[in-house]
Amino acid sequence: MNLRRLGTSLIAPAIGIFISIAVTAVILKFIGASVTTVFSSMWTYGTSPHAMSLTLNLATTYFLSALAVAVGFKMNLFNIGVNGQYVLGALAAAVVGSNLHMVGFIAIPISILAAMIVGAAWAGIAAWLKVSRGVSEVISTIMLNFIAIGIISYIIVRTGIGTETSLNVRGTKLIPESGMLHGTAFLDPGTKVYGFFFVSIFIAIGYWFLLNRTRFGFDLRATGKSATAARTSGVESKRMAIVTMLLSGAIAGLVGLPYLLGETGSYNLNFPTDWGFTGIAIALLGRNNPLGIALGALLWAFLDISSGQLILEGVPREITTIMQGLIVIVVVMSYEIVRRNQVKSEQKNVAKALAKQEVAA
């Protein structure tokens, strides 16, 4: 039964990837590009040690973003505010980290904790609005994204926290080297894999354990499947909504840290601000499962990194965006088809069992 379930879970991604490749091939033919040359070039570069290191770094960020979204999805909460939560979290970590002159094993956890607290607090606003005023978390979190960007711009431009960097862009002071988490160059001698890549593995294990081996995880999943049934069994849905959004925001606060602590060492106005929406697509692709999300993040990052080769072939790199969009659309549709077929199969099995009982009686 487990093998059968695993097989059905793999069908949807396989179909999505196949269709996206087929449609992309048609588009490449239409614009006069060589299909085999383009795909071969992307694969050759994407599997090089340098590109694989970059892929792991980007996938780490995507994975954390998708995990933050997935926590909410498990309870039918749509945390669309990961963008705002992670940029505020990254800013908090940068400010705190730049003022800590301690050994790494003390400074780094404090910076991480600061990012998680700020991310959770920002998500907590949406949770409070939903529970106390009935405001949809979709609307509130989207609005909070814009507010967060405005707050950050004001802090960096108008307050003493911001300072001119070497690139003539205002940002926070540099985090001391002891507070950085650069990682190791185990694939390519010239490219380090972020230290947060290994941290994300432990976060994934913690996520799985929390959702599948604790009372809180059971209550969360039960509320997501049927809030009415969960309340009947004694689960406080309002409290669950608040805790779930806080947890989602805490994880979201970590999204910018691989890049901050592994590369820039400072938060400036050029810091990426759109990783949250990518996380939504990857969470859907991985069906909120940590392993599925990890594979989806790797695939997404691989396409993003290898798309740089398309320019050398005279092909718009936006082709990869089309591929990514097609994969998500087809996979979600395939998952729904598989789910409906499973429901029909279960209904038939129940009907057969009832018919046998009637015959025996």
Image (tube, rainbow, N blue to C red):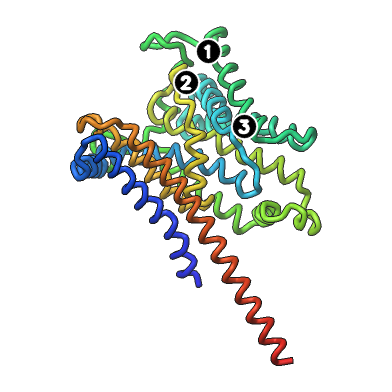
Please tell me whether residue 107 is drawn above or below residue 339 in the rendered image: above
Find out whether the residues at labels 1 and 2 contact each other: C-beta distance under 8 Å: yes
Query: At label 2, which amino acid type do we have?
Result: Tyr
Which residue is labeled 2 in the image?
A: 267
Look at the numbered disc 1 and give the secondary structure of its residue. Answer: helix
User: Can residue 78 be seen by looking at this rendering?
Assistant: yes
| Residue 325 horizontal side relative to residue 213, left or right | left
Q: Amino acid at mark 3?
A: Ile
Residue 241, percent from left and from top: 71, 43
Of marks 3 and 1, the one in the foreground: 1
The circle drawn on residue 117 is 3
Which sits earlier in the primary sequence, circle 3 or circle 1? Answer: 3
Q: Which secondary structure lies at badge 3?
A: helix
**In this image, 232 relative to 212: left or right?**
right
> 172 or 211, which is in the foreground?
211
Count of residue discs: 3
Whether 217 is drawn above or below 341: the answer is above
Amino acid under label 1? Ile
Other-residue count near label 3 (Cα within 10 Å), few / some / many at <14 / 14–19 / ≥20: many
Q: CA distance from mark 3 to mark 1?
A: 20 Å
Determine which quarter of the picture holds residue 238.
top right
Q: Quadrant of the C terminus?
A: bottom right
User: Tag 1: Cα neighbours inside 10 Å, few (<14), some, or many (≥20)?
Assistant: many
Instruction: Please give the name of the residue rendered at 46% of the width and 42% of the height, measured from the top-left corner.
Output: 63
Front residue of 87 and 13: 13
Q: Residue furthest front?
A: 30
Q: What residue would you read off at disc 1?
A: 156
